Image (tube, rainbow, N blue to C red):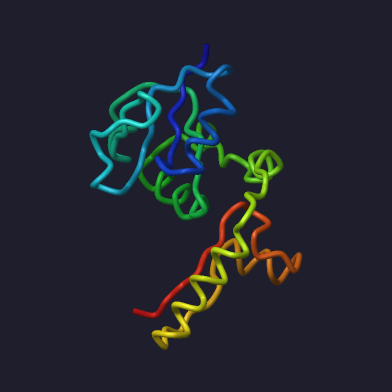
Amino acid sequence: MKKAFIYGAGYYGELVYKKIKHKYKINGFIDSNKKKEGKYLKKKKIYSPDYLTKVNYDYIFIASMWSLEIKKTLVKKKINNEKIVVFPISEIQKKIKKKKGWKKILKNILEIFKKNKINYYLDHSALLGCIRDKDIYKFGDIDIAVKF
């Protein structure tokens, strides 16, 4: 079985893990967030990106919305480009079901923002879904940014 790491120790990384764990031996997760380093996700250790230069593996599956930036960083670290796989978000998104009650929760959050005069805007996948598909919850979450 081919050995792999998943770059991204968050929700998306967990979804990729579920998708590929039967096809690859997952040696761990990689994340640039220092607070996650040394912790575990799905009983797999989370390592810093520098760890990739010290071990052998067949693939790195990038599971992040910042995949292009991560790939560029890995290539700069002399990671073999053929081992880097940007996991297509479309493979994961078709499995996500919309949770009930999200509109009510969003409405409550927006009322709190309005009451406290907090300016906000849609960001990332919510903004993309809004512009492209007129659906802010298309990707299973809603990204709201607040200028702080």
Residue at 28%, 42% in the rendered image: 36
Residue at 32%, 47% in the rendered image: 32
Q: Is residue 147 left or right of residue 105?
A: left
Residue 83 pos. (x, y %): 51, 31
Instruction: Name the outermost residue toward the right.
Output: 133
Q: Nearer the viewer, residue 128 or 118?
A: 118
Residue 137 pos. (x, y %): 64, 59
Residue 81 pos. (x, y %): 51, 38
Instruction: Give the quadrant of residue 51.
Output: top left
Residue 41 pos. (x, y %): 37, 32
Q: Is residue 76 left or right of residue 22?
A: left
> How many numbered badges does the structure rendering display?
0
Against 140, residue 124 (above or below) is: below
Instruction: Name the outermost residue toward the bottom.
Output: 117
Instruction: Give the quadrant of residue 39.
Output: top left
Q: Nearer the viewer, residue 28 or 123?
A: 123
Instruction: Give the quadrant of residue 148.
Output: bottom left
Against 148, residue 106 (above or below) is: above
Residue at 43%, 39% in the rendered image: 7
Residue at 31%, 31% in the rendered image: 40
